[in-house]
Image (tube, rainbow, N blue to C red):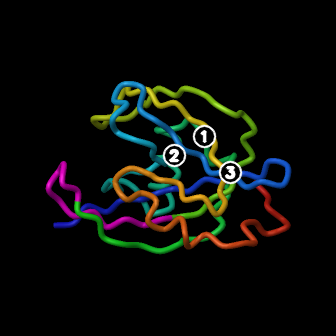
Amino acid sequence: MKKIKVVGYIIRKKQEATELLVFEHLDHPSAGIQVPAGTVERWDTNLESALFREIYEESGISKDHLKIIQKLGSYDYFSPLKIEVHERHTYLLHTSITTNTWIHQVVSNGLDNHLRFKYYWLPLNKNRIELAGELGKMLDDITPPFLPTDVAY
């Protein structure tokens, strides 16, 4: 049975550059660079509510500071660590957050509770961003213009 997952590519404009929000595990540095993602739980009303919940749990960014630009698509990923298939639904979001870096301690009912993540921004340009566990699979599907002119929160 597949586990349903959501993945959030959160971007912001800084001067003329578009940047992608990423994080590293402070408690497990070998986990690699990641983006907010997680499991759709039975109490989630839909994929988007699961996405906003996961982003808040993992980064501290509330729904009030996020705007979904589009769903980029979905794909299956086999997790060799958990020996299971994940059906990943990937979204592109914009944020109004201007903080350049921060550390967030996860608050959840899951195994990631109390983990510490260090967040920062990487330029989203022609240089490939390497994310752990094939989380970057849909980065190439992000094409300009990244943002509508009337982004409102």
Q: Is residue 22 left or right of residue 145?
A: left
Q: Amino acid at mark 1?
A: Ile
| In this picture, residue 40 sits left or right of residue 51 | left
Which picture quadrant has residue 108?
top left
Where does the image place residue 152, in percent across and percent down from the top left? 79, 58
Looking at the image, which is closer to me, 144 or 73? 144
Q: Position of residue 143 (x, y in %)?
A: 66, 73
Q: Which residue is mark 2?
A: 55
| Quarter containing the C terminus | bottom right
Q: Which secondary structure, mark 1?
A: loop
Toward the viewer: 71 or 121? 121
Position of residue 143 relative to residue 50, above or below, is: below
The CA distance from mark 3 to mark 1 is 16 Å
| Residue type at numbered disc 2 | Ile
What residue is disc 3 on?
19
- Contact check, label 2 and label 1, Cβ < 8 Å: yes
Q: Which SS does the magenta portion mostly show?
A: strand
Residue pictured at 44% horizontal, 55% vertical: 50
How crowded pointer 2 is (Cα within 10 Å; few <14, some 14-19, many 20+) is rated as many
The residue at the point 77 percent across, 54 percent down is: 17
* Left or right: 101, with 78 as reference point: right
